[in-house]
Image (cartoon, rainbow, N blue to C red):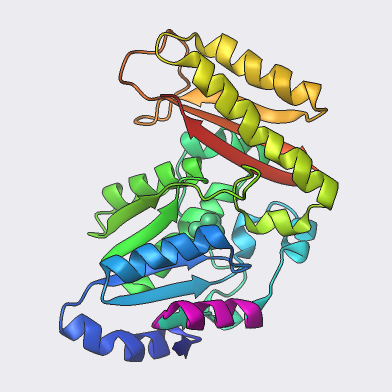
Amino acid sequence: MFLARDPASLDRALAGARRRRRRVGLVPTMGALHAGHETLIRESLHRCDRTVVSIYVNPLQFDSAADFGRYPRPLRRDLAVLRRLGVDVAYCPKPSVFPAGCALRVTEPRVSEILEGRVRPGHFEGVLTIVAKLFLQVRPTHVFFGEKDFQQLWLIRRLLREFRFGIELVAVPTVREPSGLACSSRNELLSARGRRRAAEIYHALSSAARRAGSGGRPVSIVAQVRRRLMEKKIRPEYIVLVDPVDFTPARRLIRPGARPRLLAGCRIDGIHLIDNISIP
Ligand code: PAF
């Protein structure tokens, strides 16, 4: 595996593949790799001729220095995982590649401001800015993102479309721990009890989704999730049903075939966790 620390070494590593117009897959990550990342990487290895995994804990997308500081950074372990999986290039940009105070940002004024954007102001501006830069540096043919970060996925799809990057987006379903908890690097920060409680987020979402089916009323679906979480002493930061196409809250009766998405954000042990599920 080639370890690239700046765009010039990345260009050297990918020159042959680009010249021969090979499929180059990019899996952007912030490290602390888990089973969810492994699924994204395997998907890229399966579909592409070369797979690049970027590891960069992006300060722009954290709304507090404390959250940025405590984000797990097990780089040595992560690189061992990438080698084991057979990744071609690990891109771990050194700090000078994205200097602090870089002025240009990519913003989206509507979807970026709600839900996760409200809980974590500036988060999506940070994500879109760094992801656009990674796309320009790696110049992949395919990019791989997980459905767990459903709002992020929607915004990245929008970024690719509006800026006409010419990159194919592959959305990969959420990978879960046996308890149902969605895999996330943040799970490492939970206590054993917190981890058990966190699995309730998925159970609350999935039992409401099962009961809803088509024709359910969004307010009662949301109320069911809230009730179940409150019973388990989990206070949600938001619960919402959105139309997956335009990302507007679904307010009326669910149209047959619309497949709205039920999303929740909660704080457990002081750690912000998210999950989402499709309404059948
Ligand atoms: O989903 C993530 O891990 C991050 O938001 C991403 C896409 C790697 C950008 O820093």
Which one is in front, 125 or 70? 70
Which one is in front, 160 or 263? 263
Looking at the image, which residue sits at the far front?
Answer: 178
Instruction: Tell me: 24 left or right of 235.
Output: left
Query: Is residue 177 something that shows in the picture?
Result: yes
Above or below, 48 against 227 in this view is: below
- Image coordinates for residue 39, horizontal then vertical, percent: 45, 60
- Image coordinates for residue 69, horizontal then vertical, percent: 77, 65
Instruction: Tell me: 240 left or right of 45.
Output: right
- Image coordinates for residue 237, horizontal then vertical, percent: 70, 31
Residue found 56% across the figure and 32% down from its top: 114
Query: Is residue 133 something that shows in the picture?
Result: no
Residue found 72% across the figure and 17% down from its top: 227
- Image coordinates for residue 71, horizontal then vertical, percent: 72, 63
Residue 79, quarter of picture: bottom right
Q: Quadrant of the N terminus?
A: bottom left
Instruction: Tell me: 249 left or right of 30.
Output: left
Magenta stretch, residue numbers: 76-88
Residue 42, quarter of picture: bottom left
Above or below, 236 against 169 in this view is: above
Which one is in front, 260 or 107? 260
Instruction: Tell me: 30 left or right of 196.
Output: left
Which one is in front, 186 or 153? 186
Residue found 77% across the figure and 43% down from its top: 196
Residue found 59% across the figure and 65% down from its top: 58
Considering the whole magenta stretch, tell me its main secondary structure.
helix
Above or below, 15 against 263 in this view is: below
